């Protein structure tokens, strides 16, 4: 064995030994956590949910001295990974990275049997982790430059505008349906398997409108291939302060945004929920975390388990009503 290979082998062995001793010490003291924790991300690697999970996992791993592993279990609009966590042991070692559509939109679009879990019975809310704006953007060649002009154009050309989404039941989709409902306009939904192909067709002009996340749309806004009209939250975004809100730009009451949280299987002990919550709160105050999330068009956030539960309930009530009114379904 070469000298460099020997050094690398010894380094790896010592790291493994040190990790094992730390875990043994934790176990001997009866301290939680005393073995690896798993964060399930119900989407593919590389997206915003995955980045949030890995940033948080790194901070908690450093804090507690045990590995926090991120496992991507994509499929069925996020339902596959969520159902996996719902069936996992409630021992504090498996958690779900939970974007807002999983618990507040999917159950009503897919139905309870379609998602494979009960949003309120199968999970324990831990904390909000990140929030972000949804951006209303249009193809550069569409002759509109404001929300009011988009509404007027859509009404003058009913059924002729198409809007893209990252899939049925996603925040992209429901934001557009909320817009249609409040403005009494008619646009055709074109769902894609993810945001990347949706944005590509928006840039190419195959579809004309999209409600999406800033980090996928703003690069094309900056090059003049898309036009950003507004953000969808009730207040201006600190990430895009130059843009008005849809609410103030012509659609009173319009409110849609992204959030990502952390949940655990139902029955997870309250003491563990509290400890994880405290770890999240501390991690989200770290400047490095803020910088990493801002690169994804997100802002760090945290709250209590009770506050997070209330947010889930509030959004589920709101979106389920729209889904029923618009007769939206994944079938």
Image: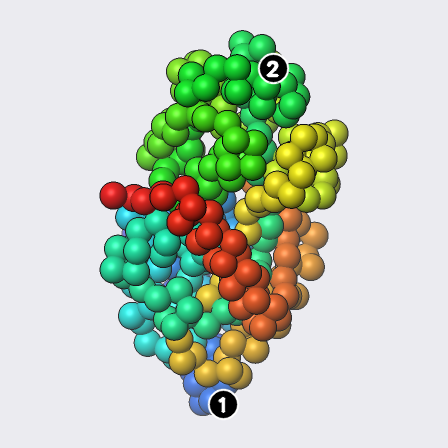
Instruction: Give SS at disc 2.
Output: loop
Give the residue displayed 46% in from the left and 41% down from the top.
174
Residue 59 x %, y %: 57, 61
The C terminus sits in image quarter: top left
The mark closer to the camera, 2 or 1, is: 2
Q: Are there few (<14), some (14-19), or many (20+) residues within 10 Å of tag 1?
A: few
Q: Are there few (<14), some (14-19), or many (20+) residues within 10 Å of tag 2?
A: some
Task: Find disc 2 in the rendering and name its residue.
Answer: 144
Give the residue displayed 48% in from the left and 58% down from the top.
316
Instruction: Give SS at disc 1.
Output: helix
Residue 130 x %, y %: 58, 53
- Up the image or down, 331 lies above or below 265; here it is above
Residue closest to the eye, 20 or 40? 40
Give the residue displayed 54% in from the left and 9% down from the top.
141
N-term mark: 2 or 1: 1
Q: Which mark is residue 29?
A: 1
């Amino acid at each position: 064995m070469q000298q460099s290979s020997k050094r690398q082998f010894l380094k790896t062995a010592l790291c493994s030994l040190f990790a094992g001793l730390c875990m043994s010490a934790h176990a001997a003291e009866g301290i939680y956590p005393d073995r690896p924790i798993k964060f399930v991300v119900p989407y593919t690697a590389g997206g915003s949910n995955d980045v949030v999970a890995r940033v948080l996992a790194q901070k908690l791993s450093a804090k507690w001295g045990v590995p926090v592993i991120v496992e991507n279990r994509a499929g069925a609009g996020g339902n596959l990974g969520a159902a996996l966590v719902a069936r996992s042991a409630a021992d504090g070692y498996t958690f779900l990275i939970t974007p807002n559509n999983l618990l507040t939109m999917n159950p009503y679009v897919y139905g309870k049997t379609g998602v494979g879990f009960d949003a309120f019975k199968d999970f324990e809310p831990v904390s909000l982790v990140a929030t972000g704006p949804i951006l209303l953007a249009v193809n550069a060649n569409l002759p509109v430059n404001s929300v009011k002009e988009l509404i007027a154009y859509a009404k003058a050309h009913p059924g002729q505008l198409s809007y893209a989404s990252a899939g049925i039941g996603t925040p992209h989709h429901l934001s557009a349906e909320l817009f249609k409902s409040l403005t009494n306009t008619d646009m055709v939904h074109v769902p894609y398997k993810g945001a990347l192909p949706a944005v590509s067709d928006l840039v190419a002009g195959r579809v004309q409108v999209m409600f999406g996340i800033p980090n996928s749309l703003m690069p094309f806004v900056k090059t003049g291939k898309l036009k950003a009209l507004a953000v969808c939250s009730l207040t201006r975004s600190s990430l895009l302060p130059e843009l008005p809100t849809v609410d103030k730009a012509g659609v009173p009451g319009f409110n849609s945004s992204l959030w990502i949280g952390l949940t655990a299987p139902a029955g997870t002990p309250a003491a563990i929920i509290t400890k994880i919550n405290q770890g999240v709160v501390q991690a989200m105050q770290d400047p490095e975390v803020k910088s990493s999330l801002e690169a994804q068009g997100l802002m760090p956030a945290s709250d209590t388990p009770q506050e997070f539960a209330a947010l889930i309930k509030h959004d589920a009530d709101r979106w389920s009503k729209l889904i029923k009114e618009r007769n939206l379904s994944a079938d």
